[in-house]
Image (cartoon, rainbow, N blue to C red):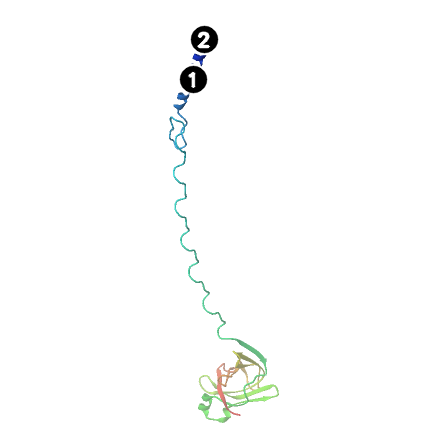
Amino acid sequence: MKLLKKITILLCFLSLIAFVSCSAEDKSGVKEKDNADGTEITGGGKSGNSGTGGSAGTGGTSETGGSTGTGGTSETGGSTGTGGGTETTEIGNFPPPAGTYRDDNVWNAWKDEKDDTKVSTVGNTTKIKGMSKRAGSGGQGFGFDISKWKKTIKDGKESKSEAVDIVVETGYEFTDISIVYYYDSSTLEITFKSESSSVDCLFKGKKISE
């Protein structure tokens, strides 16, 4: 009886071993879920190493293309200046040098020393009296009293002196009067219009004596 029980137990044990072996074989043949890349893995569980294939990279060396610059040298172009240097003006008593002035056109027309222009100073007033050449033909006498001048200084040098306050002497009637002394050429230039005839009159001469 005892022997029968032992045999029965042994058979049960062997049956259990056989059952376990079959179960293991069945599991090894089960089809697993597809991998993410669509490949099927069958038999023997997961085979080999799982990866995404090769080395991952961004592909070569990335550059922005050469050196970055603004293109050549940038300049504002040459030197900047105001053109012609500095110029200042001053109002005061700046008459031309006193003396006798001669216009060649007036002299050649009449050859008379009385027609030369005289410049003199009385107090703060400059007196200029003489003869001009009228446009076309003929001459026109004149007389002016000037009490104020505007002197222009350019690049540190006296350039010209212009009459500012002009009074026409009694007996004359003129308009558009301009009296300028140019220091660089030592020239006295007087222009005006005769009110009676509206004719342009001009005296342009240099000092010939005191």
Q: Residue 17, relative to residue 130: is it above or below?
A: above
Residue at 53% from the left image edge and 76% from the top image edge: 87
Tell me the residue that label 1 is attached to: 17
Mark 1 or mark 2: whose residue is earlier in sequence: 2
**Mark 1 Cα-neighbour bin, 10 Å: few <14, some 14–19, many ≥20:** few
Residue at 46% from the left image edge and 12% from the top image edge: 9
Label 1 secondary element: helix
Query: Is residue 118 left or right of 71 when viewed as pictured?
Result: right
Q: Amino acid at mark 2?
A: Leu
Q: Residue 75, relative to residue 137: is it above or below?
A: above
Q: Where's residue 33, x and y in %?
A: 41, 27
Q: Where's residue 184, x and y in %?
A: 49, 83
Quadrant location of residue 164? bottom right
Q: Residue 82, relative to residue 110: is it above or below?
A: above
> Is residue 21 visible from the viewing direction of this image?
yes
Residue at 44% from the left image edge and 13% from the top image edge: 10
Q: Where's residue 210, x and y in %?
A: 53, 92
Q: Where's residue 95, x and y in %?
A: 56, 85
Residue at 44% from the left image edge and 14% from the top image edge: 13
Please tell me which residue lies in front, 173 or 165. Answer: 165
Q: Amino acid at mark 1?
A: Ile
Please tell me which residue lies in front, 29 or 164. Answer: 29
Please tell me which residue lies in front, 37 or 117. Answer: 37
Query: Is residue 34 left or right of 193 when viewed as pictured?
Result: left
What's the CA distance linking mark 1 and mark 2?
A: 21 Å
Tell me the residue that label 2 is attached to: 3
**Mark 2 Cα-neighbour bin, 10 Å: few <14, some 14–19, many ≥20:** few
Quadrant location of residue 48? top left
The residue furthest right is 123
Q: Nearer the viewer, mark 1 or mark 2?
A: 2
Quadrant location of residue 93? bottom right
